[in-house]
Image (tube, helix red, strand yellow):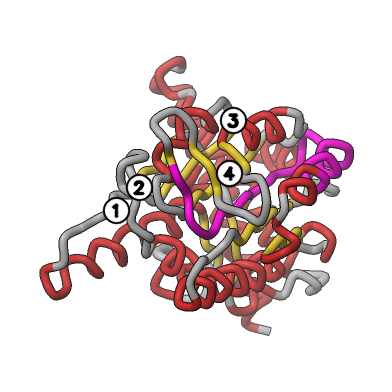
Amino acid sequence: MRALLALILAVAPANAALHFVIIGGLGGEKEYEERFSMAVEKLSESARSISTEPEAVHVLQGADAKLDNIVETFIGLQNSLTEDDSLAVYLIGHGTHDGDHYKLNIPGPDITAARLANLLEKIKATRQLVVNTTSSSGASVETLLTEGRIVIAATKNGREKNVTMFGKYWADAFEDPEADVDKNQSITVKEAYDYTDAKVKLFFETGSRLATEHSRIEGELSSSFTLARLGEAAAASDPTLAPLVARREAIEMKVDQLKLRKDAMSEAEYFGELQELLLTLADVHSEIAAEQAK
């Protein structure tokens, strides 16, 4: 069984890619313009650390973040991405909610959560992530959430309207080894979210500030959705290490998927499959460690 499992994992689609769309909205004031610009810059760098294709990282900021350009970018992804690909979308800036609709403030007409959901729906990638770091972002969650998509918001609802700290710490997560809880040189959605949520809470606790934002995460498989790599694991061009890291991440995703099916399986069947996955994962960890020691 172990040999069969290893074979299945080895033949995972080789051309699967992770694509990013990073949208930096209007700041309005110099302080916020600088803060949002810094977050976009950091997130762009971390995205490129994991992407093997430069064209897989799409950054729309300032005048480029107009609605027409955003729509054009997503239409391009609708035409190019396959079911095997993954997509992560980051929204940076100010958000508003009028009681009915969430909007991200961009030059010209704003983009609504409903419009973004419509654009994402037509993209074939079955694994998607939307991280909305803006004020009032909680109001976008229900509109954006669907099967196969993880949605993260900086606020719990549309009534939390203050400028958030979430975006700053989300960007910090991908360059801070503290976020890498399991010390495998990769940062997953869950690790980044837990790090960011903790940093935001600490910010408000320090100096006894009143918390004006409460983040939320919805969706499944966040612990096996890798968003950035650190150290030697970031060397995607390494002809030996990169395939091993990708294989490890594929196995971790299968562990997550197995956990979702646990209730529909017998105890023996579940733990049998889990053991095989963990044994294979341990072998890959050993191979990675051996390569890094050379």
Please give the name of the residue rendered at 53% of the width and 42% of the height, measured from the top-left corner: 103
Q: In the shown orientation, is residue 61 left or right of residue 31?
A: right
Q: How far, Cα to Cα, is label 1 from label 4? A: 20 Å
Q: Residue furthest left?
A: 208
Q: Nearer the viewer, mark 1 or mark 4?
A: 1
Q: Earlier in the sequence, mark 3 or mark 4?
A: 3
Which residue is disc 3 drawn over? 114
Amino acid at dot 1: Glu
Up/down of 11 relative to 267, above or below: below
Q: How far, Cα to Cα, is label 4 from label 2? A: 17 Å
Residue 208, quarter of picture: bottom left
Is residue 5 magenta-colored?
A: no
Is there a contact, CB below 8 Å, between mark 1 and mark 2? yes
Which class describes the residues within 10 Å of circle 4: few (<14), some (14-19), or many (20+)?
Answer: many
Q: Earlier in the sequence, mark 3 or mark 1?
A: 3
Q: Which residues are magenta?
A: 72-96
Q: Residue furthest right?
A: 79
What secondary structure is found at the residue carrying circle 1? loop
Q: How far, Cα to Cα, is label 3 from label 4? A: 16 Å
Residue 279 appears in the picture as rendered: no
Q: In the shown orientation, is residue 141 left or right of residue 197?
A: right
Q: Position of residue 185 (x, y in %)?
A: 54, 70
Residue 277, quarter of picture: top right
What secondary structure is found at the residue carrying circle 4? strand
Residue 200 appears in the picture as rendered: yes
What secondary structure is found at the residue carrying circle 3? helix
